[in-house]
Amino acid sequence: MTYFPEEVVEHIFDFLGSHRDRNAVSTVCKAWYHVERFSRRNVFVGNCYAIRPERVMARFPGMKSLSVKGKPHFADYNLVPYDWGGFALPWINAAVRRCPGLEDLRLKRMVVTDDDLDLLARSFPNFRSLVLVSCEGFSTDGLAAIATYCRGLRELDLQENEVEDHGRQWLSCFHESCTSLVSLNFACLKGEVNAGVLERLVARCPNLRSLKLNRAVSVESLNEIVARAPYLVDLGTGSFAVDHHTDAYQRLMNSFSKCKSLSSLSGFWEASPHCLDAVYPVCINLTVLNMSYAPAIQADDLIKLISLCFKLQKLWVLDCIGDKGLAVVASTCKELQELRVFPSDIYGAGATSVTEEGLVAISSGCPKLNSLLYFCYQMTNAALITVAKNCPHFTRFRLCILDPWKPDPVTNQPLDEGFGAIVRSCKNLRRLSLSGLLTDQVFLYIGLYAKCLEMLSIAFAGDSDKGMVYILKGCKNLRKLEIRDCPFGDIALLNDVAKYETMRSLWMSSCDVTLGGCKALAAKMPRLNVEIINESEGSDKLEENISDLHKAEKMYVYRTVAGPRNDAPDFVWTL
Amino acid sequence: MEEDLENRGGACPQLLDLIPNESDWMMAPEASGEGRGVGGLDDSEDKKLELKLGLPGGGAEEAAVLSLGFFSKASKTTTTTCAGARRGLFESAESKSEGPRQEQQAGFLQLQSRAESGNEWPHKAVWAGGKADLQQSHAAPGGAAGPNTSSQTRAAPAPVVGWPPLRSFRKNLSNSSVKPSVELQNDNVEMKQKFDNNKKGLLVKINMDGIPIGRKVDLKTYDNYEKLSLAVKELFLGLLAAQKDTPENENEEAKQAFVGLLDGSREYTLVYEDNEGDKMLVGDVPWDMFVSTVKRLRVLKSSDLAALRLGAVSRKRTATES
């Protein structure tokens, strides 16, 4: 291969889609390293603190598309303090200096300010796509800057961000000449937008295929929009608060029936029973349906809707669908690949919720199921064993039994056998979340069978250090391990310190690791950052004679070539 | 630790001895305040709870004690965060907090309702760790915990940080669509306030150019600008049609008048007078802010806009248009 001219090698590398493949070929020899680095267009950084931005840009000067992730996953559940870090600015600054041809930026769990967005908007003339997922720190003013300066913008996709509302005029900042939008998602915004402006924007963007409106957009507005964009493929409906007796409702039904391309629906924030009839004409083509923001829609309406969705591949619902509703899904949606069932009322007893029966029904009816997120109040080993047998293709299996330590209610046993069956059967399992009553045994099974596992989330499980050791020893492909409230301590932590350099990160909170253990880890492994997050008020200094025996409440360990970070707040100690 | 537990009886002070790292528990005085704040329990109530621990029969009591101890080890790091109190690295928060933890546990396991639905699990400690027992042993105090939580509407879960693993916006979904069955100790107060405010109503005058008779509109019945705009149309459509001497339903022209009220692009524009006496364009500020400052409304002919002296900021723009 080294005798081929570089252009040929580069052309061959073009066929390599994944980052991992490209990373792999760049380690073969110097020549390949050089060819690869100049030809890489999409750069993915899984942990923004693993490497300095300048170094990334220096290595990949041809970078056109950058994706960076910041905070650890448990930040989604408020376990990471607000100002822990994950700032976007260093990355944007570095790109401004070194990669002015940047076209796409995707940030996940990072802190992005309005100034950052302003800088971004003004600095990259070819900028096409901004995707922010679970970010915070900005307001609609930042969006106004993006709208104003990114003239050729194709995609503005805001997923589940915390955005401060500074008014509705940001949407008006899209210039009259902006006609390039393909995807616009502002479903997470809390404030209103100007309906007329929105409608005109939609009307002048003929390539618009994905539009997700926020809760404040009325049905009247939705009507106007759908009428002007019949080629939409993916629609978030906005409020959908409409009385099915009105003219508005009739018009809506007519509009929907003209949307021949619509295959993905979400939103329905204020949808009430009976008003989903308008959507029936499109059900036959739906591949993605997200009803998980509509708590007022109960099982019967969901059933009527879903029983028309034969092509459904991805379904997100609330647990008010019930086992009965899941049975209907199982008998109707034979193409189903991904199912997420969220709890509708976490403070209640789960009067209408789902149980193991619903999951078993789905597993027997939907042979293509490979991704599951299931919140329920109980689960049995028998059910899990059945599910494992029916669905050996799981790549993501996340089960959340809402009561911690809850055993199998029929046998009163821990759920070790059930999860064991899952990992034994699903040879391609990449992501697993455990819950319920679990002993060290389940970790033995996971270490033994889950050879492809990359991400494992554990809470309120295990008996001893052995549990964690089984995981670290057995799961060769483990990249992310996050643990909370488990009796794993220093012995487990220090059992195989080199392992952590093969992983992206380890999170442990409310476990038994001590400050001394963390220090020992940091001392042995200089290329890991061992961060302790200390939230007790008043003790900011590590030097304050804190005994090594004290428990480390929150510990985050990650491999890095950038050394300890210089933007850590006072309450984060890097050992 | 197991040996220790077996040797101890069920008395309250000795239960506290089960907690490892005793010195931590004796830390800062404000700690007990924190514990109190959550559970509002004192010694006598501790004792009351303590008596109710475990199942009838001595053998089970030991298991219950064992499991409680075990749980307290695992759970002492959980936070009761009614007020979002920070959790300490050093466990200072729970010196006398058998109670809050129990309560938290009771709610945490949502046994309040479970207890009512009947405890179907066998009473035997099937599993050595005794965690199964824990749940049974709490089924009894589940009811007992009730009277201790007088400050709360029910022994609702004191939230454990980050559990269940749900994004915040998902936790609030069922609040925001008004479900009467929802009982949330944290949000009860807010919900009540919301309803109270709605009862008062906010009637403001609204006039339209060319129509001598004004109307009044209750802004509390709307929650966004679109709804207000529609309401304005309904209020004046008839009057406008009457002015032009044509029957209401056929007057498309009149209906057209009300399109685009909020963006100044059509025949009429909606403006308002705020509490400082300035005339402002409707729609620039978030709805709630608008409602708190509006004094009266007016539907102006857009051509007359320039003629008026508008208030300080007619359109807020953060980015200058080049």
Image (cartoon, grey):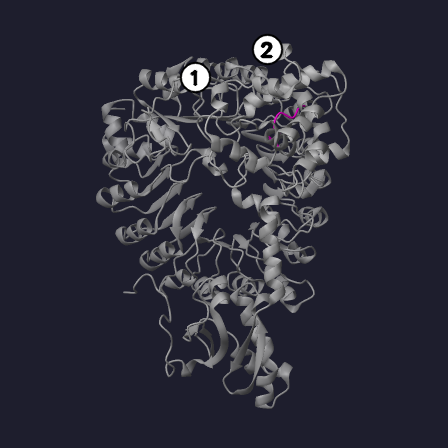
- Tell me the number on the disc at residue B4: 2
Name the spot of residue A14 as percent of width and height, x first: 34, 35
- Chain ID of residue with mark 2: B
> Which part of the image, by quadrant, shows the N terminus of chain A?
top left
In the depicted structure, whether residue B62 falls above or below residue A166: above
Q: Amino acid at mark 2?
A: Asp
Looking at the picture, tell me which residue is in the foreground, B92 or A387: B92
Same subunit: marks 1 and 2: no
Q: Which residues are magenta?
A: A400-407
- Tell me the number on the disc at residue A493: 1
In the depicted structure, whether residue B287 falls above or below residue B303: above
Looking at the picture, tell me which residue is in the foreground, B254 or B16: B16
Left or right? Give the position of A420 relative to A540: right
Residue A405: in magenta span: yes
Graded by Cα atoms within 10 Å as few (under 14), some (14 to 19) or many (20 or more), the crowding at tag 2 reads: few
Name the spot of residue B200 as percent of width and height, x first: 61, 66
Graded by Cα atoms within 10 Å as few (under 14), some (14 to 19) or many (20 or more), the crowding at tag 1 reads: many
Q: Amino acid at mark 1?
A: Leu
Left or right? Give the position of A504 relative to A3: right
Q: Secondary structure at mark 2?
A: helix
Name the spot of residue B226 as percent of width and height, x first: 53, 67
Q: Is residue A268 among the parts visible in the rendering?
A: no
